[in-house]
Structure formats: C-alpha cells, structure tokens
C-alpha cells in the first residue's frame, strides 16, 4: 500500500513538474505576475511529492518488503539497518530516485533563496528546472521504476547488498556526488534563462555564482569521498583508477572549476559573458553524460549499474533534447554579442583564460580517453582497445602541472593589468620554496626525488603567495582582528580553495613517489620490515560479523621495539551472496598510512599478506575537503545576505520597474 | 548481447568473489625485477573483469596471468617482450597503455593539438581586444575633439 | 537581434556591437561537436557486448603444447594429435556451470555431426574431471590436461567455456565464447565448419588430381 503510494506520489510529482515547466513560462511570455509567482509554490509541491515518494521506498526497505523487486535485489533481512537505508541508493532505480529528489531539493532552494531575482527571471529559471525534472521523472516511471513489484511470487529473503557496498562510503558518497551533479543544473538553468531573455548581461553571473560554488563544492566532496572509499575498500591501496565512472564525475568537476573562475570574471569585469554561458551548459552536459555513462552499459566499469540499453537510449534522447537544444539556443542568441573591455597579457583575466584553457583541454583529454575504446571499435569494425591510467596520467598530469604553476601567481594578480614587478619579484618565493622543500626531502625522505621537490616546491610557492597577499591585506589595517572580519568570505573561500589544491597535490605527488609496499608470505610469528616499521604477524583467528564470518589476522606494528598499533585485516565470507572479500586494516595518520591486507591462505598456516607504507596519502582527501570548504565558504559572503536589505529597500522605493531591484543588488 | 553479460556474471561467480585484492607472495631475486613485475601487472588489463588490472583482480585468469608475468620477469624478459607475449594472445585490449599506431594518433596527439589550437584562438582574441581598445580610444579622442571644437 | 543593444545600458564597462551575421558560424562548433559525440555514443549500442573479446589467434596455427591426457595419464598429447581434419576444440572445467549447460549439445555434435571434438580440461583437478565425464558422458576424442592454464593463456582463453574451430591443417579459424547451444551450432559454428570441410575436400581433390 505504502509502495503504491510512493508510485502514485511520483506520478503526482510529474504533474507538478509539468505545471512548473509550463505555467510560469506562460506567465513570463504573457506578462502575468500571478502565473510567474506560482513557480514558488509549484516548486514546493514538487519537492514534497518527490520526498514522499522517496520516503515510501525507504519504508519498503525498513520493513524488508521483498515483494518490491528493487528491495529484493538489493537488501536482506540480516543487513544492518544503516545499510538497508543506504541500499535505497545502492543500485540504479533507487539511486535515480535520489537524484530526482535532489533535483527537487535544488529547485526548492532556488525558489526560496532567490527573492533578489526579478520575478521574470525567477520564473524562467524555475520553469527550466521543472522541465528538466519532467525528464528525470519520466525516466523513472517509464524505464526504471523502483516501485515495481515481484508479485505474484516473491522471495523469502533478499539477494543482499553487494558486500563492497556495505560500508560507510555508500552512506555518504552517492548523496554528496548527486548534490554536485544535479546542482550543476542551477547555473545551467540560469544560463538558459538568460539566453531566453535575449539580453546577455553580467547579472546572470552574479546570481549564478553562489549556486555554482556550492554545487561544485558538493561535487568535490563526493569525488573526495569516492577516492577515499576506494582506497580503504578495494584492498590494493589505489585511490584513483581513471575508470569510466570516476571520469564521469571528474569531467563535470573540471568544467565546474573552469566555470567558477569564469563566472568571477564575468561578474566583476563583464567579459567572457558568452563563454561563461557555454561553460555552464557544458558543466551540466557533462553531468548528464556522466549519468549516461554509468547507467547505459555502453562502457565497461566495475562501478557501472546493471546494463540496460533501453535506459541508455532514453538518457541519450534526453541528452540530445536538452543539450542539443541549449547549444542551438546558444548559437542563435549569442550571435552579435561582443564585449570589449580590454585587458593586458599580465591581467587576472588572462590568468582565468589560461585556467579555462587548461581545464577544458584536460576535460577533453579525459573524455577522449574514456570514449576512445568505443570510437576505435566502431571504426575498426570490432577490434578492442583499452585506454587506462598510463594514458590518462601521461596526458592529464602535464596539463595540471602547467595549471599548478600558473596558480602561484594567478590568485594574486590584478584585474586588467598586473605590474611586471609582481612577476619579477617571484624569484624570491620560488627560490625559498625550492630550498625549503629540497632540504625537507633531502633530510627526511627515504630517497631524493627531483620531481617531488619540484612539485612540492610549487605547492609551497602557491601557499607563500597566498599568505603574503592575506597578510598584506590585514597588515595595512591598524586593528588586526577586526580587519580579519572585514575581508570578504569570498576571499577566504578563494584562499581555502587554492590552499586545498596545494595540499592535495602534495599528497598525490609524495604518495606516488614514496609509497613502499611488499607482498609476501607470512605465517604466525613472522616479521617483516618496511620503511622503518616492523610488522609482526601474531596470530590468526575466526570472527563472526552480522552477516559474515571472517578469518582475522592480528598484526602488530612496532618501531624500535615499541608497539605503535595493532592491525586486524580480515578475509570475509558473506553468507547471503556467497561473496569473499578482503577487508584491509589501516593505521591512518597525518603523515603516513600503514596499510595491511590479506590475500589467500597458502599452505599450512601461512597467508599472502600485503603491507603498504603510504606517506602523505591523507593529504589528498584533506586537500579535497579544504577545497570544498572553500567553495562552501563563499556563500557566506555578506553581499548575498545583503539581498534581504535590497528587497526591503526595493519594496519601499517600489519604482515598479523590475530592472531597478536587480540593479540594487 | 544480454546473454553474454549473464554468462560473464555466472563465470565471475564461478571463479571468485567480488573485487578483492589480489595478493600473491611471489619471491624476486632483486628489487628491480620486483618493480618490473609490479609495473607490468598494473599495466595489464584483466581480460575477464570489468575494467581492472591484473594486479587488482582475484579472477582466475588474472591469477594465471600474474604467474606468467612473474615467470617471464624471472626469465629476464624485457617489458617490451612481455607486452608482446600478452598482445599475441589477447590483443590490444590487454594493454592499458594504448600502443602508438595509426589508429591511436588522434588519441595520443589530440589533446596537444587541441591545446595548441585553443592557445592560438585565445592569443588572437586577447590581441584583438587590445587593438580594439586602442581603436576605440582613437574614436573617443576624435569625438572629444569634435565636442571641444563646438 | 536588436535586443543586443540593451547591453549597452545595463552593463558597466563595455559596449556591445551588433554584427549583421544572423548566426555566427563559429558558435555552432559546440553543437557540431555535441552531435558527433552523440553519434559515437549511439554507435555504442550497436556494438558487440563490451565483455566480448575477439580472438587474436584467428588464422594462426594452434599453439604448440605437450601435455598429459586426462584418461591416460601416462600418455602425452601434442598439437600434432589434433591436426589432420576439421575439428572442434572445447575448453571446459568442472567448476564452470555453463560447461554443464552446453554439454548435451556437445554430445549431440560428436554423435551426429561427424567431426572430432577435443577437450581441454582447463585449470581443473583431473580426478574431478574424470568423474564428471563419467557422470555426464564423454563427447571428446581425448582431453588435454591444462591444470596450470598455460595452454589456455596461449590460446587467449579468458573464461570457460570456449570453443575453437580448426581447419584440416590445424589452423584456428573461429572462436566461440560461451556455451555452445543448438542455436549457436546452427547459426554460427556449422557454417564455418561446412566452409572448412568444403575447402578441405577441394584441396584434397587437387592433390589427388
């Protein structure tokens, strides 16, 4: 009954989505404020019914309702509760319901937090979001209904959630990722709305920025969590594999990064207007493309959901309509618009162009590598080829190193023109960085790597410049503490974001070059030495978990005879799915991870054991979180809060002209 | 098409569990050979799996191929020779680093070509802006003169 | 688009210029690239299953081997023993469920189609394999024990069952991955076999003549 309610709720949501797409749009073109205002309540209604639908599916999981096909495929009565709940988004249908719910959430948020927009613009944006939601709900109802029953026959118990997914990572990674993926629809909607007005002014950039920054920050969190999860879950110490599905999330992120920078330029300087619109269209396009890659089965991946060409066709058709339509609209409406503010080669505008150039090229390279097997197979009539990490690393890393180098001077460059002296003085922080890092690596590193010194020195150079800029802003004020608060939150967001990248890159470079690992045969009593740590295999025991039994090893870690920690890697056997999985144990710390995993038993009481020493690996995800924090920080900027005051003044002064209130912001 | 997918699902169940770590305790006489081995097994794709290298897969064929790579490394074969061995049996699919040949020129040089073309476009665009600003300034000057002379 | 002129008033530092082109051609580039992308993705639906791998050994001699025979452990069989006529070589194992599924059809082929069937017992235990054949009957002329999987690797095998079609000279001409059902035989294998048989008889008449 509840399940049917969920299904019905989804259908009602579809009706509301249609209304949201049509009525406010009619209001815009007929100039009827009443219809335009309906966008707000329609958005709220849409969200409520999507939420209700989701809650009904959650209920089915909560109550172990195996007459629902999706629940039967992905859950089990012995599954711990937190995994029963996260199993809702553990496979295709349910995760897409989550995606659609999140779309409803963003739409509602835009309707609430855009009182500063003109009524006309708000109506356009919400109508576009509503139109997109129609597509998502239709996809669910027509091809991927999570509420399908298995009746008349239904299983006594479910097939269980894949053991790899029975993990904290499943609880957080997909929701964060979808918040980012779907969030890119907001700048997209703003861009399209602006195109439909025929006026490409910089105001759309001002409105879009906070939404884009937040969506991008969520995407950053999602990707960071995914990398961290893969690291501790998969058992071989890797944290990025350039898998098609990983790339599917990374491409919108790269474009998103270009977009947030381009939006800043468009807002502040009024240039790149049409390019930024195009980037906003691209960002969401890559989100949709990501959904296609993951759910259509066209590309092979360990992460991909179950293969179904019918679903792929639907998404592809949706892609054609939405993106094809947007690009056509772009070509038509942007013709003849040129802005002419000039800027010098040394300006921040040029820096952003460099940023965009490198990020877009990188995205193109990742796209090419991801799709190339498909292209090759089509062109050679069936021959197969693989494109993997060696290709992606070879192409991506040099581009990013260039960007990284540019990052040292870009955030602190000036608009329009930066004095040459700024650049010529850079030799000081450059030299200081190289010397400091060189010394650190020489004295503390197990070996000397020129590449690590170079890259980490660039990171330090970036940080030095940011710190110098910050302290010069604060130093000029007589009262230091209050001046800290007078810097805008956007500025702090910028600092955090760039520092985050530096930290993440230090993590990547150091761990890639200084990781040490050993795979060897160990029996109880054996000892192995790695990177100054002594790993002692004490004993093997059997343990029982909620839905598995495991062989667990006790491995003690000592330094100079002093116990540091004990690790308990396991080899688990999940009864319901009959899967065998290795569960690594990790001793994390800021400067190094110690990682132990079990292989197979090899004769007698010996096991194959893998031992890793991974220095600075946590810095990768710590950096990722800092970047995201930077993105989130920017929306605390007071100019977005000033919207409230502007609204009050515009109500009071009430000139009757919509453009006046938008100019006040 | 779907049938074959089902077959592979069954095969996967028949051979091993989900994506587990593949940990062998192979002995190596030297660190270089160990590094060579580790490098190769990261670069070779498991023919049966859903996008994993043979280092990261527990599948039977991955295990067998790791054993072969170990044997070939101990035999003193070079990276190129070992790749040739694999190519002869499994084709381009098994190499994660696509070989440079006619069919992969676009793949390997595409990004660079794109970068160069985009750089040229940007260069022209920025230069045009600077020229236009100069031109406008001249126009503005002329207007100014006319206004002043009135 | 006359609306473009509005830009002049609402924006601060810059002016906009209307050109007379209706649609600037370069703005259509993103759309063109997108169309290309869609075509690539659409092609993906018509391709072979992503899990299918074509064989590298087509038109090559069957790899050399020298291994024990399953039912006569003292006897060594080599690649020469499967040469001489058009034949099928089937890679199977007791742990492989699809091998059991295809087994009746293999029995039928060995009875009715008049061509020899050789088996490669792949990555298996010989004791179990012998018992399996007793239980389910044996369609094979003989079975090659490949307990290490090395012959399998030389053949580019990546999962059982696989079936190779050899011509009269011991050259691999076709590989089928997956169970051999009646339909697979009728639609895929038989045409190849028939072609090879007719080629074999042609060349032998030439030799005789």
Image (cartoon, rainbow, N blue to C red):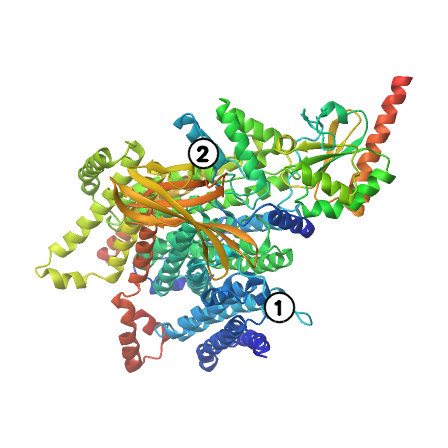
The chain ID associated with circle 1 is A
The numbered dot on residue A156 is 1
What is the CA distance from the residue labelled 1 to the residue labelled 2? 46 Å
Q: Which residue is mark 2?
A: B38
Disc 2 crowd rating (10 Å Cα; few below 14, some 14-19, many 20+) is some
Given residues A459 and C165, the one toward you in this image is C165
Would residue A113 appear left or right of C40 to someone viewing this image? left
Residue at 62 percent of width and 64 percent of height: A143
Q: Say which quadrant the C terminus of chain A sits in.
A: bottom left
Judged from this view, the residue extending furthest toward the left is A478
Would residue A253 appear left or right of C75 to someone viewing this image? left
Residue A208 is situated, as x and y percent measured from the top left of the image, at: 38, 63
Depicted A341 relative to depicted A394: above or below: below
Quarter-wise, where is residue A150 in the image?
bottom right
Q: Say which quadrant the N terminus of chain A sits in.
A: bottom right
* Element type at mark 2: helix
Labels 1 and 2 touching (C-beta < 8 A): no
Q: Name the mark nearer the viewer: 1 or 2.
A: 1
Residue at 18 percent of width and 63 percent of height: A486
Res. A79 in view: yes
Callout 1 and callout 2 share a chain: no
The numbered dot on residue C68 is none
Residue C183 is situated, as x and y percent measured from the top left of the image, at: 80, 47
Quarter-wise, where is residue A519 in the image?
top left
């Amino acid at each position: 009954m509840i399940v049917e309610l969920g299904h019905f709720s989804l259908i009602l949501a579809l009706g509301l989505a249609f209304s949201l797409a049509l009525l406010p749009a009619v209001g815009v073109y007929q100039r009827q404020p009443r219809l335009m205002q309906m966008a707000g309540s329609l958005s709220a209604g849409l969200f409520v019914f999507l939420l209700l639908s989701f809650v009904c599916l959650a209920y089915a999981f909560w109550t172990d309702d195996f007459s629902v096909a999706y629940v039967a495929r992905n859950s089990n009565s012995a599954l711990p509760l937190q995994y029963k709940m996260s199993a809702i988004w553990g496979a295709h249908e349910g995760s897409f319901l989550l995606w659609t719910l999140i779309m409803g959430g963003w739409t509602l948020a835009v309707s609430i937090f855009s009182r500063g927009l003109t009524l006309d613009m708000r109506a356009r944006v919400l109508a576009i979001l509503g139109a997109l939601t129609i597509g998502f709900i239709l996809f669910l109802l027509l091809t991927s209904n999570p509420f399908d029953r298995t009746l008349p026959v239904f299983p006594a118990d479910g097939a269980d959630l894949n053991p790899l997914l029975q993990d904290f990572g499943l609880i957080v990674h997909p929701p964060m990722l979808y918040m980012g993926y779907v969030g890119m629809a907001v700048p997209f909607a703003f861009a399209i709305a602006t195109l439909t007005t025929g006026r490409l002014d910089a105001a759309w950039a001002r409105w879009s920025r906070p939404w884009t920054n937040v969506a991008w920050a969520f995407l950053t969190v999602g990707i960071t969590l995914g990398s961290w999860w893969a690291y501790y879950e998969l058992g071989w110490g890797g944290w990025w594999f350039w898998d098609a599905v990983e790339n599917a999330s990374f491409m919108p992120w790269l474009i998103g990064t270009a977009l947030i920078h381009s939006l800043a330029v468009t807002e502040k300087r009024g240039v790149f207007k049409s390019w930024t619109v195009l980037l906003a269209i691209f960002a969401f396009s890559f989100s949709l493309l990501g959904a296609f890659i993951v759910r259509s089965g066209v590309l092979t991946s360990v992460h991909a959901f179950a293969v179904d060409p019918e679903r792929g066709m639907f998404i592809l058709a949706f892609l054609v309509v939405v993106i094809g339509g947007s690009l056509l609209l772009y070509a038509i409406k942007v013709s003849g618009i040129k802005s002419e503010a000039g800027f010098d080669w040394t300006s921040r505008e040029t820096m952003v162009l460099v940023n965009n150039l490198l990020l877009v090229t990188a995205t193109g390279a990742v796209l090419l590598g991801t799709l190339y097997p498909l292209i090759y197979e089509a062109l050679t009539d069936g021959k197969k080829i693989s494109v993997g990490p060696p290709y992606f690393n070879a192409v991506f890393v040099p581009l990013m190193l260039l960007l990284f180098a540019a990052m040292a001077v870009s955030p602190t460059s000036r608009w329009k023109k930066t004095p040459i002296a700024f650049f010529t003085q850079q030799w000081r922080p450059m030299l200081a960085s190289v010397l400091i890092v060189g010394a650190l690596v020489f004295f503390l590193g197990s070996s000397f790597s020129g590449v690590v010194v170079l890259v980490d020195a660039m990171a330090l150079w970036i940080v030095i410049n940011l710190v110098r800029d910050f302290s010069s802003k604060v130093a000029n004020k007589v009262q230091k503490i209050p001046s800290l608060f007078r810097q805008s939150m956007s500025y702090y967001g910028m600092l955090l974001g760039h520092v985050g990248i530096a930290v993440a890159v230090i993590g990547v470079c150091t761990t890639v070059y200084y990781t040490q690992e050993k795979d060897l045969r160990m029996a109880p009593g054996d000892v192995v030495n790695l990177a100054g740590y002594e790993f002692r295999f004490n004993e093997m025991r059997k343990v029982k978990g909620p839905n598995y039994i495991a062989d667990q090893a006790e491995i003690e870690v000592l330094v100079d005879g002093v116990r540091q920690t004990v690790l308990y890697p396991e080899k688990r056997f999940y009864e319901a799915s009959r899967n065998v999985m290795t569960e690594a144990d990790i001793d994390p710390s800021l400067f190094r991870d110690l990682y132990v995993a079990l292989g197979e038993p090899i004769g007698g009481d010996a096991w194959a054991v893998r031992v890793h020493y991974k220095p600075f690996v946590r810095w990768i995800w710590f950096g990722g979180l800092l970047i995201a924090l930077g993105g989130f920080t920017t929306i605390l900027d007071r100019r977005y809060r000033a919207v409230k005051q502007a609204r009050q003044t515009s109500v009071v002064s009430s000139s009757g002209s919509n453009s006046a209130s938008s100019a006040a912001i | 098409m779907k049938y074959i997918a089902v077959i592979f699902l069954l095969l996967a169940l028949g051979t091993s569990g989900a994506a587990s770590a593949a940990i062998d305790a192979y002995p190596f006489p030297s660190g270089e050979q160990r590094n060579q081995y580790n490098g190769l097994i990261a670069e070779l794709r498991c023919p049966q799996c859903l996008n994993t290298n043979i280092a990261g897969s527990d599948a039977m064929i991955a295990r067998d191929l790791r054993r072969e790579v170990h044997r070939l490394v101990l035999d003193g074969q070079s990276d190129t020779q070992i790749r040739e061995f694999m190519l002869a049996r499994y084709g381009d699919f098994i190499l994660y680093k696509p070989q440079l040949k006619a069919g992969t020129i676009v793949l390997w040089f595409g990004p660079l070509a794109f970068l160069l073309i985009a750089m040229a476009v940007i260069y022209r665009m920025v230069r045009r802006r600077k020229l236009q600003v100069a031109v406008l300034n001249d126009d503005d000057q002329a207007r100014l003169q006319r206004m002043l002379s009135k | 688009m006359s609306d473009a002129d509005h830009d002049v008033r609402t924006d601060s530092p810059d002016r906009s210029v209307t050109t007379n082109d209706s649609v600037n051609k370069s703005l259509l580039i993103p759309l063109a690239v997108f169309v290309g992308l869609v075509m690539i993705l659409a092609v993906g639906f018509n391709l072979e299953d992503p899990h299918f791998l074509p064989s590298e050994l087509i038109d090559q001699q069957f790899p050399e081997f020298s291994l024990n025979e399953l039912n006569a452990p003292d006897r060594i069989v080599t690649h020469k023993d499967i040469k001489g006529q058009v034949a099928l070589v089937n890679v199977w194992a007791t742990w492989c469920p699809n091998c059991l599924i295809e087994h009746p059809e293999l029995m039928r082929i060995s009875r009715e189609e008049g061509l020899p069937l050789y088996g490669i017992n792949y990555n298996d235990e010989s004791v179990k394999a012998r018992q399996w054949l007793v239980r389910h009957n044996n369609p094979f002329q003989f079975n090659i024990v490949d307990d290490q999987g090395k012959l399998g690797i030389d053949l580019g095998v990546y999962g059982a069952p696989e079936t190779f079609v050899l011509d009269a000279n011991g050259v691999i001409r076709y590989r089928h991955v997956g169970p051999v059902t009646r339909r697979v035989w009728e639609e895929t294998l038989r045409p190849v076999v028939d072609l090879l048989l007719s080629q074999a008889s042609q060349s032998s008449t030439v030799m005789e003549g």
